Amino acid sequence: MENILITGAFGQVGTDLITALKDIKPHDTIIASDIRIPQDSKPGIEQVILDVRDQESLRKTISRYNVTRIYHLASILSASAEKDPFLAYDVNINATFGLLKTAYKEHVASVIIPSSIAVYGPGISRDMVGSGVPTVPQTMYGISKVTGELLGNYFNRKFGLDVRGVRFPGLISYGTVPTAGTTDYAVEMFISAVEGKHYSCYLRPDTFLPMMYMPDALNALLKLSDADSEKLTNRMSYNVSAYSFSPEQLASAIRRYIPGFEVSYRPDERQIIADGWPRSLDSADAIKDWGFSPEYGFNEMVSDMITKLRSIRGRNKNAS
Ligand code: SER
């Protein structure tokens, strides 16, 4: 039995990770920590208000619950990090270093830290980018994610701490509304469509980015967490992605269900971030080392998102 601490537990990934862990590991204790606890949060878990920058509170939490595994999800995402790079440095780099140090000192068995496509920067060939392609990011989010990967490898080599990570593409889910990233237009577009509203997209219509549906992202996290350590040829930087699409492709796929859906395009500063990222990812290392295999193709994801959002947010009158 594990005592699993999640930082940033009520963000986009954490919210769904709690549900997945409760399903597949019902006997584990889940300690969900975040800077705020939502009023309608889930029963059956421990909830802790925790700012990951506060190392003493983190240490007390780890010690109090005898934490054996940490999913370190607390992070300032790409668009917010460009607005406040000093805060992003503090949360994404200083606090990650503090968390690794505390995990090692408190004898936590394993730490999982998601990384991102943001580790890449301009100047690389942007299609089917593999895990070994050089990472030279120009955004603070990307810099912080590369640093997290390097620190994870360092703590593993130096102290034997079991740290692992995947590089996530844009993640699509219906449970929370993400707003701090560059790939979040996709979720916003779905929500506008289901609510019968026009959507103004902040990326150009032809901006391709790698993406994945949340159930596949969680499967990847859980498979990597439980993978045989001997098989990991690439601890911190497994590229994982299910497909790539552009805003105009997503809009036309949504129109198969909601024919009247209208989108306009007004690229803003997030376009510059997206233009530095891969258009598609090569997940070969993850497939080979721990059997990454996403279940949802693009069409299945679109269909499931619309079904789930309709049941949560009410039916759109134009819907077919
Ligand atoms: N979804 C993240 C972002 O857009 C990228 O990993 O910031």
Image: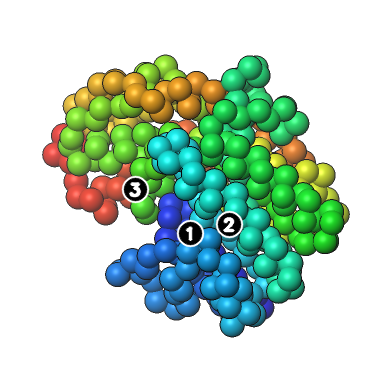
Left or right position of 273 against 111: left
Foreground label between 3 and 2:
2
Q: Which residue is drawn at 38% across and 46% down?
A: 178
Foreground label between 1 and 2:
2
State the image coordinates of residue 173 (x, y, percent, origin top left): 41, 47
Q: Can residue 55 be seen in this view?
A: yes
Hey, what amino acid is under mark 3?
A: Val
State the image coordinates of residue 260 (x, y, percent, origin top left): 19, 27
Q: Residue 8 carries which label?
A: 1
What is the C-alpha distance between the residues marked 3 and 2? 25 Å
What is the C-alpha distance between the residues marked 3 and 1? 15 Å
- Which type of secondary structure does the marked residue at label 1 adopt? loop
- Which type of secondary structure does the marked residue at label 3 adopt? loop
Camera-nearest residue between 86 and 111: 86
On the image, numbered disc 3 is attached to which residue?
177
Q: Residue at x 70, y 63 (%)?
A: 101
Q: Residue at x 48, y 53 (%)?
A: 13
Foreground label between 3 and 1:
1
Left or right position of 59 against 110: left
